[in-house]
Image (cartoon, coloured by chain):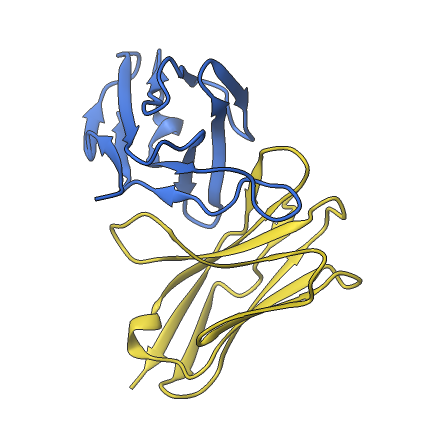
Chain colours: A blue, B yellow
């Protein structure tokens, strides 16, 4: 079954304790991305990756790191989490650009709800 | 500065009638637009898209209209069904690989 998986689904942690949220896709997609969803703000892109070893900042990259060592995996790292990073996080992947340009239709994981106290 | 705006946080429509969800954008460099649907506790799922060379794209009950001069797009759902109750996001993309999202509109289909 084609899917994007994220782990963990729920995480409560304390300020400053490093954490990693894993993301994996089994569709051989080149493009992967991380978003955070906050009330009234929709989805905001944190980082994206166009292929292995190619990553770039989205709209809200501060406080986050990513790596893309393998095509299927795109972990999100919070080196020193803070309460303002409490949010719902989604990982997504897509095959290629769509239309004239762009990232095409993306497949999303189920989300990771992170609470930082 | 929100480049993609969905000004209606929620919309209530009678089952069987037409649902119209609206989206405005400010960046004239956007050339590809997508609609996603999201149920609670799930990730968004792709619904329909349109490129800037078109003004309409249809897929079953879903039609997206694009008015480039007004920088406006809309999603029409006809007829609306109870399973359409969800949050709908509009997203836009330009020549880079970023996707800019609206805040979403919660659609409620009343029986």
Q: In the rendered view, does B83 fall on the left or right side of A99?
A: left
**Position of B13 relative to B9 (above/below):** below
Question: Where residue A20 sits in the image (x, y, percent)?
Answer: 28, 18
Question: Where residue B15 sits in the image (x, y, percent)?
Answer: 35, 86
Residue at figure coordinates x 32%, y 25% from the top left: A72
Question: Quadrant location of residue A27?
Answer: top left
Residue at figure coordinates x 35%, y 17% from the top left: A70
Question: Where residue B91 sits in the image (x, y, percent)?
Answer: 55, 50
Q: Looking at this rendering, what residue extends furthest in the right direction?
A: B69
Q: Looking at this rendering, what residue extends furthest in the front direction?
A: A28
Image quarter where the N terminus of chain A lies is top left
Question: Where residue A21 sits in the image (x, y, percent)?
Answer: 27, 24
Image quarter where the C terminus of chain A lies is top left
**Position of B20 relative to A1 (above/below):** below
Question: Quadrant location of residue B60?
Answer: bottom left
**Position of A15 relative to B93 (above/below):** above
Residue at figure coordinates x 33%, y 21% from the top left: A75
Q: In the rendered view, does A53 fall on the left or right side of A28?
A: right
Q: In the rendered view, does B44 fall on the left or right side of B33?
A: left
Q: Nearer the viewer, residue B80 or B111?
A: B80
Residue at figure coordinates x 35%, y 11% from the top left: A79
Q: How many marks?
A: 0
């Amino acid at each position: 079954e084609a899917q994007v998986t994220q782990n963990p689904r729920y995480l409560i942690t304390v300020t400053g304790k490093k954490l990693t949220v894993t993301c994996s896709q089994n569709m051989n997609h080149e493009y992967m991305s991380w978003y955070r969803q906050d009330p009234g703000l929709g989805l905001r892109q944190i980082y994206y990756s166009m292929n292995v070893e190619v990553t770039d900042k989205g709209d809200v990259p501060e406080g986050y790191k990513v790596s893309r060592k393998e095509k299927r995996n795109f972990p999100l790292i919070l080196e020193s989490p803070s309460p303002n990073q409490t949010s719902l996080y989604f990982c997504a992947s897509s095959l290629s650009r769509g239309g004239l340009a762009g990232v095409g239709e993306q497949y999303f994981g189920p989300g990771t709800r992170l609470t930082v106290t | 500065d929100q480049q993609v705006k969905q000004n209606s946080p929620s919309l209530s429509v009678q089952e069987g009638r037409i649902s119209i969800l609206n989206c405005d954008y400010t960046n004239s460099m956007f050339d590809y637009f997508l609609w996603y649907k999201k149920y609670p506790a799930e990730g968004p799922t792709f619904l329909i898209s349109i490129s800037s060379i078109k003004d309409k794209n249809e897929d079953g009950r879903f039609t997206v209209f694009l008015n480039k001069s007004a920088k406006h797009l809309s999603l029409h759902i006809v007829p609306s069904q109870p399973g359409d109750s969800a949050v709908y996001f509009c997203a836009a993309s330009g020549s880079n690989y970023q996707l800019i999202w609206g805040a979403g509109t919660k659609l409620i289909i009343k029986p």
